[in-house]
Image (cartoon, rainbow, N blue to C red):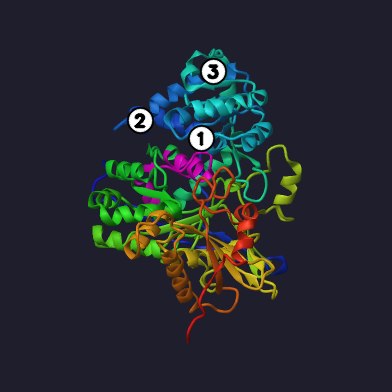
Amino acid sequence: MEPDDVERPPLFAEPSLEILPDALDALLVRSRTALGDYPPTLIASLRRWAQEKPNDEFLAERVGGTWRYRSYGEVWRRSEQLARRILAAGCTPEQPVMILAPNSIAHAEIALGAMRAGVPACPISVSYGAPSKEYARLGHVASVATPGLLYIPDDEVLVTAARTIQHLVKGVVTERDLDKMPLAAPERLAEAEAGLGPDTVAKLLFTSGSTDKPKAVPNTHRMLCSNQAALAAVWPGLFVEPITLVDWLPWNHTFGGNFTFNMALTNGGTFFIDGGKPTPAHIAMTVENLKSQSPTAYFNVPAGFDALVPYLESDTDLRRSLFRRLKFLFTAAAALPQSIQDRLQDLAFQERGESIPMVAGWGSTETAPCATAVHFANEVAANIGVPLPGTEIRLVPDRDKLELRVRGPNVIPGYWRDSAATRNAFDEQGFYRMGDAGRLIDPKRPECGIMFDGRVSENFKLRSGTWVNVGALRVAVVDALRPLIQDVVVAGHDRNEIGLLLFPNISACRQLILTAAEKPASVLHPVLTESLANLLREFNRAARGATTRIARFLVLDTPPSVEAHEITDKGYINQRAVLTRRSEAVDRLYGSEGTQVPSVQQ
């Protein structure tokens, strides 16, 4: 143990940025902090901790009411066995191991075994295996990835799904039969391990497919390891002692699979696999897991914090456990409504007598995943921070916005077997074109951070020719309509006025109606309609013209569909998918069924 008088590093490194003018009125923003050395591969980190502290807990999952653990030494030995089986099955760098499974110790071990064999691990969304007539997305990702092996748990639903793509896969194995597979010779594994390096593809992840079919993104060890080194440089105080994470984020997405999982692995921490989700059916499990284990940092998406806050406000034990060791809260994937951030700070004051740092980051599957991060005191929920060491951000004018483009060791060299997509993804200077927009919060003080400004492609023009900033408007409306509304889709392309499609928070709506009227048969009730109309009228008091004034709304009676990709696994609404799939609802919104928002009385 360190003596008490040893000086510890601060939680956050002070940001220092360089701002350079670029061509066509663009700006180049980069950190002056140097990116330090980093391991050549994730497997090197696993080997290190298996040698230095083989008995320390690495992974844990709940079986029944009991936590089951795997030490670093146990995972290292298990990964060797699985790597040899993967090689014997005929998998190669061009024929990955596809994993159709929820987060689990078994999932982690087979992914690490694949990487150790020099074979990409390819986790895909469990939602692709949900009962379907066509299994179109499952078939698409299998045809693109050409897996040498498909791994599935002993789950009849997923087994049924796997049968539909057997013709696209060399082999299929369930968890029950995994150890029946033959073993390659130890010498063959040693040869594969000797060939591992920074440019070896560690993972093949698929994009969410919000604007097209999911694209396959090869993540190299250089991308993944450099990203963790950059985070360690800006959050030095987080890693003074081994970190503890309690995390539900799905591993087929870069936030959970790369950001949080790799953070535990790279820094020798303990990763508690949370089987819950921010949904009414699963949030109770997350609550129980957080009451059982106290994280040193907590990572979530806005939908997750939104679901968790009411429990924190009502459960003293949960609040005490979450804040007991916590150094900061982190959000990404979408903008966190300011009201949720304020409630979290109120809870921190109740429990600790002081605020808790609320930080955020920004990136994508193609940036492995973090390109920017907050590492300073911040009170602005939409602040995505500043560029990480080694990463450059280019802000390029695009109509009424500034598009954010990224270059660095964490950025993909190109898409998997798709030269056309690769060409279209990069600009003339080699910056990856994310499609997101941002702006400096204070151009005179760039260290204050970058404000997320929505998707460039989400914005649209009203018939008057003026642009609507969908991202900012959506966050503001969701904030104004809480807790009655779960999420919002903004409509109005080529129309005279803005309309909203509203996804209700069923429990909150029923409570409202039950308080004011009889027991509701449906949340589509006049009491709800009137309440929403009044809230939107108040919202419009602050409107600055037609681009922020809400004219009408329609409450939808079916939730967003994961299968139809109206909502991602992380809970982020896909504006384009909803508007396309529910075009008839848009017609109803602008027809006789749409509710007009009363005019503001001056």
Residue 396 placed where, x, y %?
A: 67, 64
**Rendered image quadrant of residue 248:** top left
> Mark 1 or mark 3, which has the lower sequence index?
1
Q: CA distance from mark 2 to mark 1?
A: 16 Å
Q: Which residue is mark 3?
A: 85
Residue 304 horizontal side relative to residue 220, left or right: left
Whether pointer 3 and pointer 2 mark residues with C-beta atoms closer than 8 Å, the reply is no
Report the amino acid beneath label 3.
Arg
The kind of residue tagged 1 is Leu
Tag 1: Cα neighbours inside 10 Å, few (<14), some, or many (≥20)?
Answer: many
Q: Is residue 361 above or below residue 293?
A: below
**Residue 451 in sight from this viewpoint:** no
**First of labels 2, 1 by sequence position:** 1
Bin the neighbour count of mark 2 within 10 Å (Cα to Cα): few under 14, some 14-19, many 20 and up. Answer: few
Magenta stretch bounds? 236-264
- Which of pointers 3 and 2 lies earlier in the amino acid sequence? 2
Q: Nearer the viewer, residue 101 or 127?
A: 127
Determine which of the numbered discs, if any, sits on residue 53 in the image. Answer: 2
> In the rendered structure, are the residues bearing label 1 and label 3 in contact, judged by CB atoms less than 8 Å apart?
no
Residue drawn at x 53%, y 38% is: 127
Report the residue marked by disc 1: 42
